[in-house]
Image (cartoon, rainbow, N blue to C red):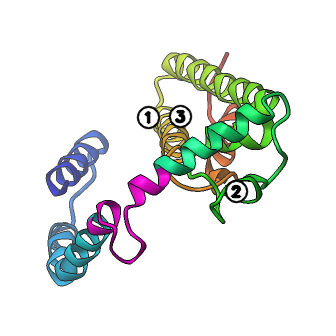
Amino acid sequence: MFVAFLLGLLLLFLSRRIVINIKLLFLILITPPLLFYIFSSQITFFYESRIKHLFNDVEGGNSIGARRDMYSEAINIFYENPFLGEGTNSFPFYSKWDIYPHNLILEIAAEFGILGLIILSVFIISNLFNFNKLFILQQKNKSLQSFSLVSFGLLAFTFSLITSQFSGDLFDSRFIFFFSVFSMNLYKVLPIEE
């Protein structure tokens, strides 16, 4: 990761022909390894405890098994009322779990049924078409700023969509909606000509 960071900085400096300040360069090169060294024991402890929690049945662990059970219950709730679902935030009332199912698609299926899944599908597909159109338009412009913002928006939208399949509820998926609005407003901000 550090090597990728350095290569990115090098490309930035070369593409912009920025005069490199030696103090700034030293600070950029020394800070990430120093921070990693200082916090390495905390980082190691965090990941080690998280991995144990995912797979072991100790202290309420086995998160993977619990999520599998939540997914199964969400699917069963969907089968009981497939067209309209059971209603907003109904998963805890119709399952043995006091929380959400940790999967956006299954949560929408259980709580809003096929209608909710259709709305979500249209939303995701229209956003992907929007990002595709933005990429095509920004290629005509050949602006680094346009490319960077469109790429960032698409990556953030995709990342948020993927992570919402493993954790979080409908409210935690707010970044998906944020980056959708972000992409819709790029037409107004960027120097993109149709």
At numbered mark 1, what does the secondary structure look like: helix, strand or loop? helix
Q: Which amino acid does label 1 sit on?
A: Leu
Residue 49's disc is: none
Residue 171's disc is: 2
Q: Quadrant of residue 58?
A: bottom left
| Image location (x, y in percent) of residue 108 | 71, 40
Q: Is-magenta flag for residue 63?
A: yes
| Residue located beneath label 3 in the image | 150
Q: Is-magenta flag for residue 2?
A: no
Marks 3 and 2: which is nearer the front?
2
CA–CA distance between discs 3 and 2?
Answer: 24 Å
| Image location (x, y in percent) of residue 87 | 85, 47
Q: Give the range drawn in magenta.
A: 52-67
Q: Which residue is drawn at 64% across and 54% down?
A: 169
Q: Which residue is drawn at 70% across and 56% down?
A: 171
Q: Nearer the viewer, residue 132 or 186?
A: 132
